[in-house]
Amino acid sequence: MSDRATEIAALLAPTVASMQLELLGAEFVASGASALLRLYVDAPGRAVTIDDCEAVSREVSAQLDVADPIASRYTLEVSSPGIDRPLFSAAQFARHAGAQVKLALRIPVDGRRRFQGTIGAVQGEAITVRVGEHDIALQHANIDKARLVPDWAALGFGSGVADQGKPGAAKNKGRGGKSRRSNPPNGEPSTDATEHEA
């Protein structure tokens, strides 16, 4: 996560926790005079619903209006993690030890910025990823982005899924500047998005 995303996630995490949900992390992307703030939430023991996303969006929107941490116009998007869930902390890597992960680094390791491998041991902020026959030692602070790689066979899909690409969720514009994705099948994320003026 960027420094801004980390600050915003820390600000909003208690609000999300009060709703019996977990704020996994945030992405903040500024583009000219506007920005996108995407929050990923999880619900321990069950799937996140579009109602959860809408409820979180309402609560954190009010908090963001008061705290005003974003100077520009921005779109707030609240999403479930989906089956290719992003990983934002070393603790989340530890939770998914043994799973396949794709990651991008801030500073290259062994001349590479991108890796795909199996999450191994996690000790503090040190993460080991098995890539082929080699263990790559990484510091969490050097990981720019990381996502789990879905095990399509374990999810009951044939090998043809890889050829079809990731199933998409249609994004429809609603009234009042709100755009919303429906609660799609196959583990795709539930999403609610709202536009905010500066």
Image (cartoon, rainbow, N blue to C red):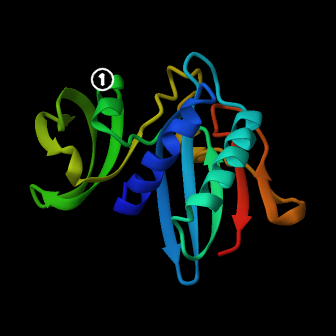
Specify the quadrant of the image occupied by residue 149: top left
Residue drawn at x 48%, y 62% is 28
Amino acid type, residue under disc 1 in the picture: Gly
Give the vertical position of 34 relative to 135 (above or below).
Answer: below
Q: Residues within 10 Å of mark 1 (few under 14, many from 20)?
A: some
Specify the quadrant of the image occupied by residue 117: top left
Which residue sits furthest bottom?
32
35 sits to left or right of 9: right
Give the vertical position of 160 relative to 104 (above or below).
Answer: above
93 sits to left or right of 5: left
Residue drawn at x 35%, y 24% is 95
**Mark 1: which secondary structure?**
loop
- Foreground residue, 32 or 86? 32
- Foreground residue, 137 or 89? 89
Indicate the quadrant containing the N terminus: top left, top right, bottom left or bottom right: bottom left
Q: Give residue 25's position: percent from left, percent from top.
A: 45, 44
- Foreground residue, 145 or 198? 198
Q: Give residue 195's position: percent from left, percent from top.
A: 72, 65
Q: Would you say residue 82 is visible in this rendering?
A: no
